Image (cartoon, helix red, strand yellow):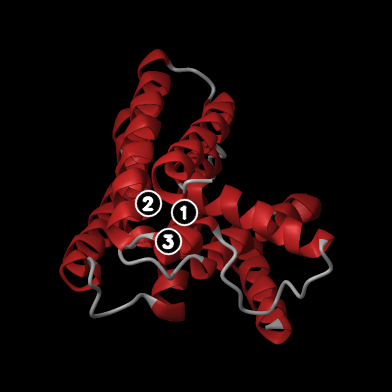
Amino acid sequence: AIVRLVLFSFFYFLILLINFDFKFFFLLLILTLIFLKFSIFTNFNDGGDFYIPLNYIFLIIGIFLYNFIYTNNFIINYLCIVYLSFLLSFYFFNFPPAKVFLGDSGSYLLSLFSMMIFMINKNFDIIFITIHFLSPILIDSSFTLINRALLKKNIFKSHNEHFFQRVIIKKNHLYLIKYTFFLQILNFFAYGMFLFYEFELLTLLIFSVINYYLYKLIINKNVLRI
């Protein structure tokens, strides 16, 4: 796991370095960590049937709308259509009960999506949009790792402490998909309002955190009974 982390870090830094002036060295390091986090956390959560694809479908549609309204870059539109076609096709194999899983290769392929879009237009709104729509994955994974570190547990060791894992163990994959879809509908509504009124997308992250905890509270009450 440590060797793979080092290799991924080097890979992301190298790709970003090709597209940036070397004087932004510190910025490159920060961006490398951000995109590396997208990859690792996507792979962490590849245990729920259609859980990862569902979150990424909303992300891709969100970036497609952003590009259509503000930049209308043909390459970005093309990438969105290709990725969306892949995920919609994957639905027939990954929807519960899943017959095929993303695995490492599929997870890393999806996590590269935002990185490629960012490299094309170099707009930091892409990062904020990605964090917004991947909030179920990113927030849960972040706090799970922090909690394990505070408890002095090995963060590289396999476990079942992620929120989505506890939902699956308690109920099943369909419950996870249903509530995640509800969360993303709310995220998409808020995102549409921000686009329409041209608000700063950075402030959208506050809504992402609040909405995630609302989502977690609903599942705790109706599924986990905590």
| Farthest-out residue, front | 225
Check contact, mark 3 vs mark 2: CB within 8 A: no
Spatial separation of the CA atoms under disc 3 and disc 2: 21 Å
What percent of the width, then of the height, locates residue 170? 42, 61
Q: Earlier in the sequence, mark 3 or mark 2?
A: 2
Above-or-below relation of 205 to 177:
above
What percent of the width, then of the height, locates residue 167? 44, 57
Q: Is residue 107 left or right of residue 161?
A: left
Comparing 46 with 104, the one in front is 46
Q: Earlier in the sequence, mark 2 or mark 1?
A: 2
Q: Would you name the residue on which mark 3 appears?
A: 170
Give the amino acid at mark 2.
Asn
Give the amino acid at mark 1.
Ser
What percent of the width, then of the height, locates residue 208? 52, 34
Q: Would you name the residue on which mark 1 appears?
A: 114
Query: What is the number of the mark on residue 55?
Result: 2
Report helix, strand or loop for mark 2: helix
Spatial separation of the CA atoms under disc 3 and disc 1: 32 Å
